[in-house]
Image (spheres, rainbow, N blue to C red):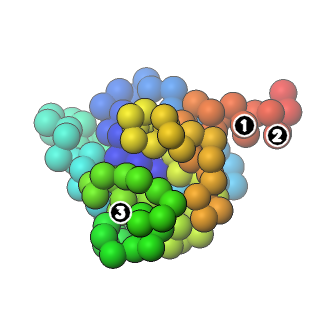
Amino acid sequence: MDANVLFSAAYRSDAGLRKLWRLAGVRIVTSAYAVEEARRNLSQPPHHRELDELLGCVEVVPTAAPTDHLLFSSVVELPNKDRPVLLAAIGVGATHLLTGDFWHYMGPYCGKRIQRVLILSPRDYLSLRTRIAGP
């Protein structure tokens, strides 16, 4: 899960993407880097408390180094600040990377797999889960 998803869920307690936290059989994982970025961008103490509450059921994994990885020299073009999130997803064997970063991820990589990690918006992921599970 990317920082912007964490940010949005903490910023708005009525955000629809909070459904992600209520899905059965889903392991929610994020990187320490994404947590730091979300926390840095949340300015109000109530939002920090919301983030802490949400993180209670999220597995936070160490941040991967954003440089010196073959993936970025040949397959994926991402700014250095976005690389640790993708590397963390790959490193933990995530099936999906959920992001609202429409500029760097969603434009060129939306719906694509990078080393077995499918990049989707939270909305697309929830829609996919609904189609698979049925009405």
Which element type, helix, strand or loop, lies under badge 2? helix
- Quarter of the figure that contains the C terminus: top right
Which element type, helix, strand or loop, lies under badge 1? helix
Residues at marks 1 and 2, CA–CA distance in whole angstroms: 6 Å
Residue 95: image x %, image y %? 64, 58
Amino acid, disc 2? Ile
Which element type, helix, strand or loop, lies under badge 3? helix
In the current view of this chain or complex, which residue is farthest to the front? 74
In the picture, measured across the screen, residue 47 lies left or right of residue 29, that is left
Vertical relation: 112 (above or below) 19: below
**Residue assigned mark 2:** 132
Mark 3 or mark 2, which is nearer the start of the sequence? 3
Q: Residue at x 50, y 73 (%)?
A: 91
> Number of numbered discs present?
3
Mark 1 or mark 3, which is nearer the start of the sequence? 3
Mark 3 in CB contact with mark 1 (< 8 angstroms): no
Q: Which numbered disc, 3 or 1, marks the residue closer to the eye?
A: 3
**Numbered badge on residue 128:** 1
Looking at the image, which is closer to me, 15 or 67?
Answer: 67
Q: Residue at x 46, y 51 (%)?
A: 1
**Residue assigned mark 3:** 84
